[in-house]
Image (spheres, grey):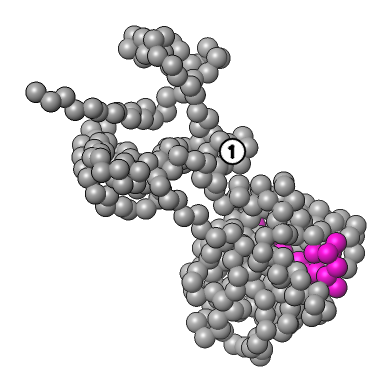
Amino acid sequence: MSIKNLVMLVIMDGFGLSNDQRGNAVAASNKPNLDYLFKTYPHTTLGASGEDVGLPAGQMGNSEVGHLNLGAGRIVYQSLTRVNIAVREKTLDKVPAINKAIDKAIANNSRLHIMGLLSDGGVHSHIEHILYLLEAAVKCGVRETIVHAFLDGRDVPPQSAKIYLKELQEKIDELGHSKIGVISGRYYAMDRDKNFNRLQLAYDALVHNQAPLKDYLGGIDESYAAGVTDEFVVPFLANANSNIRDHDSVVFANFRPDRAIEISTALTNPDLVPLERKVYFKDLDYVQMMLYSENIKGDIAFELQELKNTYGEVIANSGLKQLRIAETEKYAHVTYFFDGGEEKDLPGATRVLIPSPKV
């Protein structure tokens, strides 16, 4: 009778180790088999939160991220973390696409525009990324850098815009050679549902220099007085002649794609977005922080990570068989996420789905 050599990987979702005994269900439970394994065999621990699994420092992990990192066999950095690391290591401006945009603005004696959601919500963008890009551009010698501030009010308090605008203006006052251009609620500049009447107002301000001219804080106060919170602030100009022009460079600092697609497509591939236009760009250097859409013409600062040689691929490429078993609740985790965020039909792999109890 032949004996097969089997290796089992068991992922116990939610199981963790801590020296703190208070509220520690794992430490308080009766688990003789696990206790025996820990006493008898060599073992180690893996970090399951924060930068250990590609999240920002201090952020708790989750099942999807955990399975993704385990299956990849390496840290898979999430978008926010990838940009955070570049800022921390002072390399964001050295990313080829961004470096090219800065160099082109200098060579053309033109302007660099930085657009983005101005908050520290960390869902679509982060103000620290915008401030870093601004400082880098000025110190590199760009003639004029203009920041177009899209106001949040959803991922941060609804009347917090002045906090971020004051921080931005302080940096501008410190650096010089820069100014705030368009101020717009995300409702207009970051539409994602083909509400082109909204997008038109943001586009008119950004490209046609067509919007009311207001003091950057006064415009916010005026909106609040009318019961309009940050998200819905109608686009206005904080400084005249801040519009995007031919031969300029544009860096969109948002890293999440969905609400960056429409305005980016309108600026770079106008035939796909039905807006009224007075200007058609012939030479606009455009940078999307991540890949937003294949329809956007321009460079990408951070390419999508391609995860090769995941756990499952290594097993399959070695001619070995593998069996993935999970209940319904975790089936996607031991397949899609464990395989690097892709649906893969690996040779020699069998999947078994056990229906989860209806509780």
Residue in view at x 51 percent, y 36 percent: 61
In the visual, does 20 lie left or right of 108? left
> Is 294 situated above or below 13?
below
Residue in view at x 59 percent, y 59 percent: 302
Residue 99 location in percent, x, y? Answer: 72, 65
In the visual, does 29 lie left or right of 139? left
> Is 92 situated above or below 42?
below
Q: Secondary structure at mark 1?
A: helix
Query: Residue most toward the left?
Result: 1
Query: Residue most toward the bottom?
Result: 278
Q: Which residues, given as a range, are shown in magenta?
A: 137-153
Give the amino acid at mark 1. Glu
The picture quadrant where one finds residue 334 is top left
Can residue 152 be seen? yes
Indicate whether residue 69 is drawn in magenta: no
Number of numbered discs on residues = 1
- For the N terminus, the quadrant is top left
Q: Which residue is mark 1?
A: 51
Can residue 115 be seen? no
Residue in view at x 80 percent, y 60 percent: 136
For label 1, the crowd category at 10 Å Cα-Cα, with few meaning under 14, some 14 to 19 and many 20 or more, is: many
- For the C terminus, the quadrant is top left
In the visual, does 262 lie left or right of 246? left
